Image: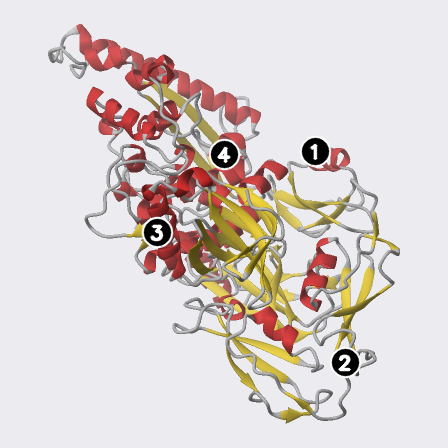
């Protein structure tokens, strides 16, 4: 273990240990050459003399060094110093996704989807460069304090090729694809499977397959169907569950073919949560469950024995129960339906016993039975009994959910509309949304259950309401919604007391981020610094000068503080513009601290790494008035479109299919109908008072329609909407962005309801 103060390669000063893995320890260090903090991964001493481990350690850097993407941890340097093998990486101040899930239990649909999209984008960039990660799991996904998601630890990645085979499983078996645990060929679709398992864990708080040892878990990946995530999270949108199902198909040919397709469906699920747009390949039930051979069992044992953990599996570690499960071959199927009037979730477990397979002539050592024999009749009788039981269960579940009356009839929903199977009478199936703000969760449940509305806690936020009370709801009180709609709400953290920290020696960006992470609202002001006896500024330009109220003062969450930023020494109306081309964005903004106005623009570039400055105006070393001259820098977004234009909106739209929904929209437009939303927006979390952009997205018969309704305006919150939407479309999604340092950054996503006026 390295100690604080040690210097590696005459450049990297070790500050503290921040993590450990199977092969290496990770330290925070100071790069004295570029004056920035970095993460340094050091190969553990027990592996340094092992040529195989050293080769794997170096291959990690070689695989990832060429990847530059906003959602991938950057590799800066690699080498060895007197037997110490190291990799220098971008330092991410934050926690792993695994830690985040453990902390929250499970994530909201919006948050899980957003994280999954960012992970997909990073993996897509790697796949486009011929790199397969092969160890996608929450432990290898970092979430920074400012919400950025980055994939790290390409520890077993290598350039993918048509003849790349894996003889062992290096990653955690909980997230490994069937082809990985079998020890066969693995490619980009293996990453898609692992992503699906990760998404499953985000929304349910658990992995789909678990067991007492790695062999038992590996067998479940091969043999068993996962419990549908909606069993653990009944409010999970239908479309998101289907995405998880498609990612985790056991056959690679039934999964998504590339990450871009996953991204497209994830984005569409945000605006069409109940949509049936995920194309799942139908499976031949007769061949769905395959009993693997004794030879394959042995291969799995050997594969797990040679896994990256370095721990060999002893013979007595083989779990007899796992073997029993293997022989029985369990399966799970699910059928769900969702519609405007509600949703009925039905799942049942079908256990195929080996005896039944033998009766059908498929058991080992048995001859095929004649169709007219008893071996064929017994399974048929069992299936008929099971079908009768299933019908009885559907009736009971339907009655308890309010979908069926006591006589077994009622309203059954599907994805197109509602069909009344028991009566011809039409009814208005809408209710008025109550005001939940300021209520306890128990009071909110009592208010909504009586009118058949669901509620869902999607997060916490500082507010002026007492801690524990509802501070905000996403569908405004007074709106009319269909029965069984779920109202999402936030819980107040109150105005917790805190002590303002010191900002000494911090860049303005670091100080602002720290203060905002504490729940404070930060305003900034730039001033010239006092000089020392030699005429140099006490605080360099771009660094934190002071805090108002002063550091050490008591404050509370939600309070507004002013961060005073140094402009360096005052040399009059002329100052030299520094050269920031090639710097990282935050480093460039700090270097330009003398200038009052700094605009940051983003641009795609195949030649410049993401986050790096491509160009600047005025040019370097130009003399300009720092009070009046605005400096503009253009920052590369790599091979991804800038966030402002990408705006988390669907990149691809399916052509609308002729059907009931399209006909309704067309008829409404032809009749000149006007559909409006008059909901109210509360102050978004993290809002700094900047200019706002609002973008409305609606599903118009299978095609996403996007329109900017506010662009570059200062809004006063709470803000009353008066939006006119697409005729005949009763819902939409509103994306809210704030302009920060010249770039629009997403602050919130709101579900809107529209009605005809």
Q: Residue at x 37, y 14 (%)?
A: 321
Q: Position of residue 493 (x, y in %)?
A: 77, 45
Q: Is residue 619 left or right of residue 552?
A: left
**How many angstroms separate mark 4 from mark 1 (CA)?**
24 Å
**In this rendering, does residue 748 appear at all?**
yes
- Of badges 2 and 4, nearer the viewer stands 2
Instruction: Identify the residue position indicated by label 2 in the image.
Output: 536
- Of callouts 4 and 1, which one flags the residue occurring earlier in the amino acid sequence? 4
Choose mark 3 or mark 1, whichever is in front.
Answer: 3
> Dot 1 corresponds to which residue?
450
In primary-sequence order, the first of circles 3 and 1 is 3
Residue on which the image places disc 4: 230
Q: Is residue 482 above or below residue 349?
A: below
The image shows residue 718, relative to residue 625, as above or below, that is above
Q: Nearer the viewer, mark 1 or mark 2?
A: 2
**First-in-chain label (4 vs 3):** 3
Quadrant location of residue 104? top right
Closest to the observer, 590 or 643: 590
Q: Position of residue 700 (x, y in %)?
A: 46, 60
**How far apart in space, not on screen, are marks 1 and 2 (Cα)?**
70 Å
Residues under labels 3 and 1: Cα distance? 61 Å
SS for callout 1: loop
Q: Residue 255 appears at what percent x and percent y?
A: 32, 44
């Amino acid at each position: 273990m390295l100690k604080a103060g040690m210097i590696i390669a005459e450049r990297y000063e070790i500050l503290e240990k921040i993590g450990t893995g199977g092969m290496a320890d990770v330290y925070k260090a100071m790069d004295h050459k570029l004056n920035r903090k970095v993460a340094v991964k050091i190969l553990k001493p027990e592996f340094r003399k092992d040529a195989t481990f050293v080769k794997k350690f170096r291959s990690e850097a070689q695989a990832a060094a060429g990847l530059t993407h906003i959602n991938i941890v950057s590799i800066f340097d690699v080498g060895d110093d007197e037997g110490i093998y190291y990799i220098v990486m971008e330092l991410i101040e934050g926690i792993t996704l695994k830690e985040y899930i453990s902390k929250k239990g499970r994530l909201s649909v919006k948050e899980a989807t957003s994280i999954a999209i960012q992970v997909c984008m990073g993996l897509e960039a790697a796949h486009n460069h011929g790199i397969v990660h092969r160890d996608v799991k929450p432990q290898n996904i970092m979430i920074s304090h400012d919400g950025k998601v980055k994939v790290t630890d390409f520890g077993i990645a290598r350039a993918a090729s048509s003849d790349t085979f894996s003889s062992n499983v290096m990653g955690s078996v909980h997230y490994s694809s069937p082809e990985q645990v079998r020890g066969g060929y693995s490619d980009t679709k293996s990453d898609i499977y692992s992503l699906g398992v990760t998404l499953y864990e985000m929304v349910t708080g658990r992995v789909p397959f678990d067991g007492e040892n790695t062999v038992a878990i590996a067998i479940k990946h091969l043999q068993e169907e996962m419990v549908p995530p909606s069993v653990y999270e009944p409010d999970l949108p239908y479309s998101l569950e289907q995405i998880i199902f498609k990612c985790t198909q056991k056959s690679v040919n039934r999964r998504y073919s590339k990450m871009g397709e996953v991204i497209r469906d994830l984005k569409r699920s945000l605006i069409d949560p109940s949509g049936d747009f995920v194309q799942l390949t139908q499976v031949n039930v007769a061949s769905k469950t395959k009993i693997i051979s004794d030879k394959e069992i042995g291969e799995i044992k050997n594969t797990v024995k040679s896994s990256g953990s370095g721990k060999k599996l002893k013979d007595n570690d083989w779990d007899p129960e796992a073997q029993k499960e293997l022989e029985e071959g369990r399966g799970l199927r699910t059928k769900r339906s969702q519609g405007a009037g509600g949703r009925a979730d039905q799942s049942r477990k079908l256990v195929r016993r080996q005896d039944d397979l033998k009766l059908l002539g498929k058991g080992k050592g048995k001859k095929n039975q004649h169709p007219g024999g008893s071996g064929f009749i017994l399974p048929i009788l069992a299936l008929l009994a099971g079908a009768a039981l299933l019908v009885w269960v559907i009736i009971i579940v339907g009655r308890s959910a309010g979908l069926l009356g006591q006589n077994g009839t009622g309203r059954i929903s599907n994805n197109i509309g509602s069909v009344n199977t028991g009566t011809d009478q039409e009814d208005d199936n809408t209710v008025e949304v109550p005001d939940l703000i300021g209520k306890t969760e128990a009071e909110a449940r009592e208010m909504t259950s009586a009118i058949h509305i669901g509620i869902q806690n999607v997060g916490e936020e500082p507010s002026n309401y007492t801690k524990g009370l509802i501070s905000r709801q996403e569908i405004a009180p007074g709106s009319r919604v269909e029965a069984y709609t779920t109202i999402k709400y936030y819980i107040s953290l109150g105005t917790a007391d805190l002590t303002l920290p010191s900002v000494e020696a911090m860049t303005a960006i670091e100080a602002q981020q720290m203060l905002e992470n504490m729940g404070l609202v930060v305003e900034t002001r730039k001033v010239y610094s006092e000089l020392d006896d030699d005429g140099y500024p006490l605080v360099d330009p771009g660094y934190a000068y002071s805090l108002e109220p002063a550091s050490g003062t008591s404050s509370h969450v939600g309070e507004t503080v002013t961060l005073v930023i140094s402009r360096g020494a005052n040399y009059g109306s002329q100052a030299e513009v520094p050269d920031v081309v090639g710097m990282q964005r935050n480093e460039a903004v700090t270097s330009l601290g003398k200038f009052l106005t700094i605009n940051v623009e983003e641009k795609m570039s195949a030649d410049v790494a993401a986050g790096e400055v491509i160009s600047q105006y005025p040019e370097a070393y130009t003399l300009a008035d720092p009070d009046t001259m605005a400096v503009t820098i253009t920052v590369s977004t790599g091979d991804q479109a800038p966030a402002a234009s990408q705006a988390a909106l669907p990149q691809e739209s399916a052509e609308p299919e002729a059907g009931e929904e399209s006909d309704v929209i067309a008829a409404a437009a032809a009749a000149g109908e006007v559909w409006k939303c008059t909901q109210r927006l509360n102050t978004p979390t993290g809002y700094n008072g900047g200019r706002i952009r609002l973008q409305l997205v609606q599903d118009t018969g299978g095609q996403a329609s996007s329109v900017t309704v506010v662009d570059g305006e200062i809004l006063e919150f709470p803000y009353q909407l008066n939006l006119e939407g697409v005729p005949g479309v009763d819902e939409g999604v509103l994306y809210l962005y704030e302009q920060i340092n010249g770039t629009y950054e997403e602050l919130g996503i709101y579900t809107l309801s529209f009605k005809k006026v």
